[in-house]
Image (spheres, rainbow, N blue to C red):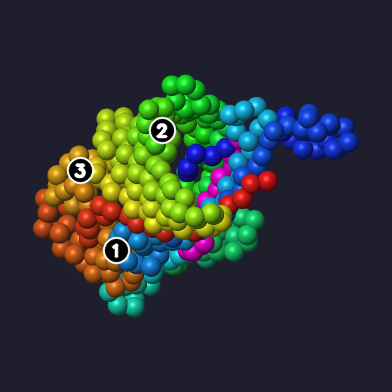
């Protein structure tokens, strides 16, 4: 989700016109910039959009537990000086498909283990019958009616939620695939470079976890300090980009130097402050350093996340989520937005972990005054840093 740039009708018409119709002096001064990038993780504004890879691999969240992604970009620089449009995308290259990470029998993906409290073959068989038919002694009519209901869909098999079996959880990284459209205007003046535009963030996959979202932005780089850029991004309506209707304020510094012909080194740092409903703070400090060799760019990137409250929901949402009450953890055994802790995939998922955690929860429920309301989940600290590498190649036509 960098600054991206939509093909305007004027440019399309100009490119399609025969060369014989336009005199040389009348040809539009337009260009197209194309870039293909491969990144070791999809991180934007300090948010780890591929954190679900840790769940699939049943590892604790860390600074580099994401997944590789392909991120192409096409920028159309129109004949109108300063007016540009961009199409940008991000597509996971690993862990795209949903996986079964808990390994238990359930009636829905991520549901309760129906055999958790059943010991021995007969008890487990009864639990299986009860979860499907509502009784340990279903009639022939119950069995026929239930089976008919489960196979009446277009697939014609027993895949409809409600059938007790092992389900794949909704953790495939294809759910984070994205296509962004940007149209903007940028102009250099005597007092500095000014820009503005609008970005539309859309999911690139029908099973995407995020809805479409639009942001409007303005930017300014003063002439006395051109390496600094001040930017404001404002959501046009509530959505997932900033965790609801909110704003993102950015102060960035970036510069580069040509070492020799075709070879350039560069560096940048961005300070981002987020304002959301009932929550605001420094969201990220993201730095990048790299080298560009004749269009091929290699860079190392690191994001420091000062206020972990702004990142907590993105981890929980990958795991089905839980209420972010500001209640003390001990009351319900849950986490809250301010404790800096999230579910630990290395201790939560897998058949053995699921069984052990269920037994611990049973003991706690029997000894707690809250009984069945108490939930036990092993937790870890939210990673304070993230790092990733980027390899890209770009050219203009």
Find residue 255 and report its horizontal and vertical position in percent: 41, 43
The residue drawn where x is 77% and y is 32% is 27
Residue neighbourhood size for the residue with mark 1, other residues' Cα within 10 Å, grouped as few (<14), some (14–19), many (≥20): many
Cα distance in 3D space between marks 3 and 2: 38 Å
Vertical arrangement, residue 385 with respect to residue 15, above or below = below
Residue sticking out furthest to the top:
190
Earlier in the chain: of badge 3 and badge 2, it is 2
Q: Nearer the viewer, residue 323 or 256?
A: 256
**Element under label 2?**
loop
Q: Nearer the viewer, mark 1 or mark 2?
A: 2
Residue bearing mark 2: 226
Residue bearing mark 1: 60
Q: Nearer the viewer, residue 238 or 14?
A: 14
Vertical arrangement, residue 273 with respect to residue 53, above or below = above
- For the record, the magenta segment spans 85-98
Q: Nearer the viewer, residue 341 or 369?
A: 341
Q: Residue 87: which quarter of the image? A: top right
Q: Nearer the viewer, residue 70 or 347?
A: 70
Find residue 11 and report its horizontal and vertical position in percent: 72, 33
Q: Residue 245: which quarter of the image? A: top left
Instruction: Please report contact status of discs 1 and 3: CB closer than 8 Å, yes or no.
Output: no
- As for residue 142 lying within the magenta part, the answer is no
Residue sticking out furthest to the front:
260
**Element under label 3?**
loop
């Amino acid at each position: 989700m960098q600054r991206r740039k939509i093909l305007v009708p004027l440019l399309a018409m100009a490119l399609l016109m025969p060369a014989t119709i336009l005199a040389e002096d009348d040809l539009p001064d337009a260009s197209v910039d194309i870039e293909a990038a491969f990144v070791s993780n999809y991180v934007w504004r300090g948010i780890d959009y591929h954190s679900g890879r840790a769940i699939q691999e049943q590892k604790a969240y860390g600074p580099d537990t994401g997944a590789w992604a392909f991120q192409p970009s096409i920028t159309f620089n129109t004949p109108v000086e300063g007016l540009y449009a961009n199409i940008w995308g991000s597509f996971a290259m690993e862990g795209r498909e949903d996986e079964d990470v808990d390994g238990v029998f359930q009636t829905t993906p991520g549901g309760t283990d129906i055999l958790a409290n059943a010991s021995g073959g007969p008890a487990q068989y009864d639990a299986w019958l009860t979860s499907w038919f509502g009784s340990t002694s279903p009639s022939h009519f119950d069995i026929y009616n239930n089976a008919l209901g489960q196979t009446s869909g277009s697939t014609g098999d027993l895949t409809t939620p409600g059938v007790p079996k092992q389900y794949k959880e909704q953790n495939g990284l294809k759910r984070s695939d994205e296509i962004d459209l940007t149209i903007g205007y940028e102009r250099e003046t005597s007092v500095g470079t000014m820009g503005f535009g609008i970005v539309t963030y859309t999911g690139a996959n029908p099973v995407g976890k995020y809805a479409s979202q639009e942001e409007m932005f303005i930017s300014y780089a003063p002439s006395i300090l051109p390496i600094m850029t001040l930017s404001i991004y404002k959501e046009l309506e509530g959505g997932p980009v900033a965790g609801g209707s909110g704003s993102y304020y950015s102060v960035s510094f970036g510069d580069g130097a040509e070492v020799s012909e075709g070879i350039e080194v560069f560096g940048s740092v961005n300070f981002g402050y987020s304002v959301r409903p009932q929550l605001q703070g420094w969201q990220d400090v993201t730095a990048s350093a790299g080298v560009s060799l004749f269009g091929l760019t290699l860079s190392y990137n690191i994001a420091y996340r000062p206020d972990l409250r702004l990142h907590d929901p993105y981890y929980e949402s990958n795991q089905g989520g839980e209420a972010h009450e500001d209640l003390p953890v001990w009351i319900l055994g849950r986490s809250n937005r301010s404790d800096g802790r999230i579910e630990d995939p290395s201790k939560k998922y897998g058949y053995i972990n699921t069984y052990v955690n269920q037994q611990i929860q049973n003991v706690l429920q029997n000894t707690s005054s809250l009984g069945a309301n108490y939930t036990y989940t092993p937790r870890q600290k939210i990673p304070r840093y993230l790092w990733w590498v980027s390899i890209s190649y770009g050219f203009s036509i």
